[in-house]
Amino acid sequence: MDSIDTNTEINNVVFDMVTNKGERVGDISMKSPVLLVFLRHFGCAFCRAAMLELSEKRKKYEKLGIRLVFVHLSPNEEAEKYFERFQLSNCEHVSDENCVYYASFGLVKGTFNQLFGLSSLMKGFSYTFKKGHGWGKFVGDGFQMPGVFLIQEGEIKESFIHKTVSDQPDYDKIVSCCFIN
């Protein structure tokens, strides 16, 4: 979380973020923890893998009272097609085509090594061809790095900021902070 100046700044930002269902992310976080997932572009194999994994975990998180909210780089109408494809229909999401929220959360544009380093290329090949996630057209900013934040009562409780595009967050570990007294 060192790339984020203050929780006060984030508190203001989450109350500016409005989902496709008209709710402010900050208001949602006052009622229940929010797993706020900043995706890469929808053509990215790693983005697709993340959406598939979260689709599989969605019901489990909902039973725990955790709301899953995605932030993406596309117009909402276009994003709906991708969410539907990964059985995430009716999910809450925020369009951030200009990367304003990404920047507010400290998520930067990737360097050459972050995007195309040997590890990412090898994993990308595996995800694209062996695991069948495919590679699609750039739908959004192909240089934008992703990240994951657990927001509760308007504050960041846990985070995972990708160092490379191929990093894999441990979503269960991130949400576990909600249940530690």
Image: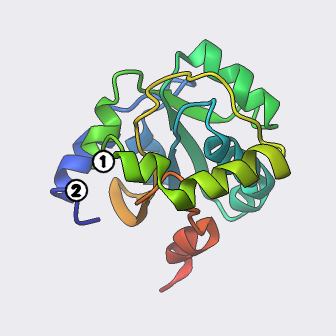
From where the camera sits, is residue 153 visible? yes
Q: Which residue type carries mark 1? A: Phe
Give the number of callouts: 2
Residue positioned 57% across, 18% down in the render? 76
Residue 171, which numbered label?
A: none
177 vs 120: above or below: below
Residue positioned 60% across, 65% down in the render? 171
102 vs 3: above or below: above
Specify whether 51 is left or right of 86. left
Residue 105, which numbered label?
A: 1
Colour option used = rainbow
Residue positioned 62% across, 13% down in the render? 77
Task: Give how far across and how far down residue 89 sits, in percent.
Answer: 76, 31
From where the camera sits, is residue 150 visible? no
Q: Which residue type carries mark 2? A: Ile
81 vs 127: above or below: above
| Mark 2 nearby-residue class (10 Å; few <14, some 14–19, many ≥20) | some
Tag 2 near tag 1, CB within 8 Å: yes
Residue 4, which numbered label?
A: 2
Residue positioned 29% across, 30% down in the render? 100
Q: What element carries label 2?
A: loop
| Closer-to-camera residue (32/52) | 52
